Amino acid sequence: MDYERLTEAYSAMEQTRSRLELATLLAGLFRDTPPEELAAVAYLCLGKLGPAYDSREVGLSDKSVLRTLALASGTPLDNLQANYAKAGDIGLVAEEALAAKSQQPLFGSPLTVSRVWERLHALSLETGSGSQERKFRALAELLHDGTPQDARYLCRTAVGKLRLGFSQMLLVDGLAEAFGSREERSMVEAAYNRHPDIGWLAQRTAADFSSLADVRTTPGIPLRPMLGERLSSAEAVLEKHDGESAFEWKYDGLRVQAHLLKGGTRLFSRSLEDLTPQFPDVVDALEQALPTGVIVEGEALAIDEAGNLLPFQVIAKRRGRKHGLAEKLEEIPVGVRLFDLLYANGQETLDTAFTERREQLETLFTPSDRVACTTLLRTTNAAEAEQSLLDALEGGCEGLMSKALNGSYRAGARGWQWIKYKPDYRSDLADTIDAVVVGGFHGRGRRGGFWGALLMATRTPTGFETVCKLGSGFSDEDLATLKQRLDPIQRTGPPAGLKWKLEPDAWFEPELVLELLGAEISQSPIHTCGGGYAVRFPRYKRQRDDKTPETATESDEVIALYKI
Ligand code: ATP
């Protein structure tokens, strides 16, 4: 097929915003495309050379494309550079330059989709000395044989900025319309969720539409991940899950989908990017814990010297870019907390109930200090779930993920079978509270050796009343400074004038004021503020060294917030 047929479609698609119209344009394009070029057309519509987990790129810089254009069009490089600075779009500069070319080519080979595809592919593999020069010549050849409109899209594709502004899901719409019907879109999408390779899908859809129903997970090809909805009360979560749910700690790491295969393990990110080369230690940890022939999902975290889990991103960010991370990570061990099993014993397990998948996962792997399953509490009781949330917050997590017991793994879908359960700080309490530290609880795990949670109090005209146990929102640095501040002011018993019920591990002189944010004020049997009120899900904001206990928030102010 002529490349021009594709660039005409690009151009028409650039001029419409309507999803339905875009899908129809795509469907027309797909129907016109011969089977052997369908995969290439599908990838090229996204400006890609393969599926998301194939990182190949043409990899030409704007600068080299401008140089190529100067050669192909005879326009001085300075002019092109000035136009580019003005237009900001390499495609428009290319189109204009080639349209202005005085002589159109006399000889040339036809510019077909296959030729463009093969050339771009070959370019993506070019590395090493002289590679820029070779890329440069190959692009010039294509530009020579194409129309000015072809040049617009060729140059955009070459620099990785095709940007037609639609997603793979729109291609799914187009494929359904081209080879089946709009009504059958969900079947195409289900196949895509299990095998998110748009080129492969295009070919299969065209060749045998009804066989899409048989598409299953293929080891080595990542599935689109399942996603959750969000709620901020345990009662609401339990109601959604018919009275009982599995509440798991929600770790703050890097989601990995690991395919343990005979030929080697492959890791994929939430957006299906291939992470394998970047994280050899995650591969290593998983290979030691799991047999081959399985696909699992988990959260990768870094482990510090004391064996505590740290957010993976901390290291990923601190170390900077993707490249070079592998060497750096060798010094810092990683752990994985597994939460799902997607494939085992030669078949996918997506339609197996969550509890069974979890059981299977637990029997499959060998626990080690680096690999474990997520902490999980199966309960019908909202108070227990809430306690688990508090433990998770104290353990450095941002909340819980609750899973419907009978839920299947719905690849690519966001639904109520998974619910993020975390405090909603945007709700009732817009104002922060400045409370006084009166007691401390020893930290465990990652917070070992520090004060893991603090007993906080508000002020009354005659003394203090406890208002919450503050165990969340501390960075490692905060924990260290708080220890330094609090250790010297420990005392043997509760401060005079303090009303309390919850006994901490240590008491402090009421000196240090901390600002905290809560999700709401609720009645509490264990706190004494206003005769039994507390801040729910308190989160540490900062030290208020400018405040003394005498200017801390009063109990009456907290009660007023409850009544709002
Ligand atoms: P989303 O993935 O829902 O679009 P997001 O990327 O912002 O949103 P969050 O809303 O914070 O992520 O929550 C989902 C993520 O939580 C998952 O993608 C996964 O990486 C992580 N996670 C941590 N612990 C668990 C767990 N026990 N079960 C499932 N996911 C978990």
Image: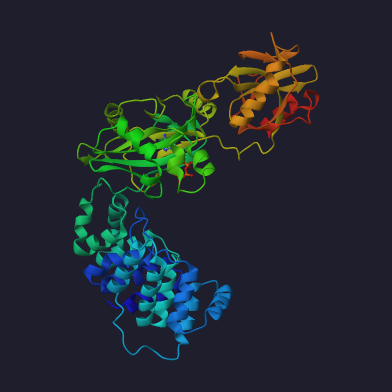
- Say which residue appears at 25% left-offset and 64% top-offset: 180
Ligand 1 location (quadrant): top left
Q: Residue 260's x, y, as percent?
A: 28, 39
Depth check, front residue: 383 or 198: 198
Q: Residue furthest front?
A: 129
Q: Residue at x 31, y 84 (%)?
A: 108
Residue 402 lies left or right of residue 292; in this view the side is right
Relative placement, left or right, of 148 versus 445 is left
The front one of 476 and 124 is: 124
Quick one: 535 or 495, which is closer to the camera?
495
Residue 352, visible in the rendered structure:
yes
Q: Quadrant of the image for the C terminus? A: top right
> In percent of the image, x 50 and y 84: which residue is there?
75
- Is 343 displayed left or right of 16 in the figure? left
Residue 314 % position (x, y): 52, 39
Residue 402's spot in the image, x, y percent? 42, 33
Determine which quarter of the picture holds residue 535.
top right
